[in-house]
Image: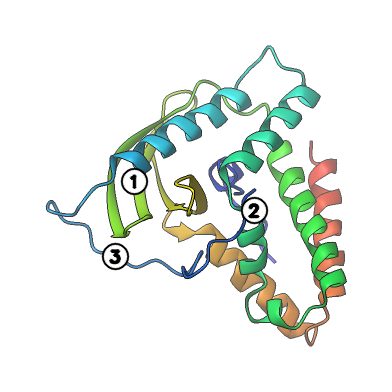
Amino acid sequence: MRRPALLSARLLLASLIAAPMAAMPVCAPVAFAQSARAERDAAAEGFVSVEANRALQILGDRNLSVEAKKKAFRTFVDEIADVPAITGYVLGKYRRSVTDDQYREFSVAFREFANSVYETRLNTYKGEVLKVTSSIVRRPGDVIVTSEVVGGQTKQPIKVLWRALKNSEGRWHAVDVQVEGVWLAVTEQQDFVSTLDNAHGDISVLIAQLKGDKKDAVKAR
């Protein structure tokens, strides 16, 4: 199982607590063609711009202790990312076969795993900012926002795409991020499903692996 790359982007989500949105394929693979005439969504662009830069400010705040930064960033993730939807999505076909108790145990392990990875990078941000450049409306309330991370230690702009969904209350949430051409939640699902296929569907194997990777991430700090 591959360790998540650029968790700053994933959990500017990463990521990424609200009820899953019905009647929408929350984290389905995204395919689209961008054109000069494509419809843009100013609200979705504003959501990404404000929240992504808020995350970078938390990560780069030298006045916060490590523990304070952890707490602030976890709160941020809960506010802007649809974590339950992402958690269910990454199990793929196995979401239907696990028991409620197994799912609760997996949810805790998955969240702690994600936390441990971004927490190893808490002191690596040095003034980066995110600039939104465009967006494409896939359908009302389902928007791909294109952005660039610049400044700080970034030698060249890093292109980051966000999939933002609006719920029935009109609130936006991030459900996936594309970094270096890879949709991260989609890749995570592929990794987890492969692990479960090899384990004949035994989710305890995946949970144990997540807990082991968490320990490795903590040791790396």
Q: Position of residue 17 (x, y in %)?
A: 65, 48
Write down the residue under mark 1: 146
- Mark 2 or 1: in front is 2
Mark sitting earlier along the chain (1/3): 3
Q: Where on the picture, by quarter, is residue 129?
A: top left
Q: Residue at x 18, y 54 (%)?
A: 38
Q: Marks 2 and 3, how far apart in space?
A: 24 Å
Q: Is residue 179 visible?
A: no
Note whether 214 is above or below 124 in the view shown. Answer: below
Q: Amino acid at mark 2?
A: Val
Q: Secondary structure at mark 2?
A: helix
Q: Residues within 10 Å of mark 3 (few under 14, many from 20)?
A: few
Q: Position of residue 96 (x, y in %)?
A: 70, 81
Q: Amino acid at mark 1?
A: Thr
Mark sitting earlier along the chain (2/1): 2
Quadrant in the picture for the N terminus: bottom right
Q: Marks 1 and 3, how far apart in space?
A: 12 Å
Q: Secondary structure at mark 3?
A: loop
Write down the residue under mark 3: 32
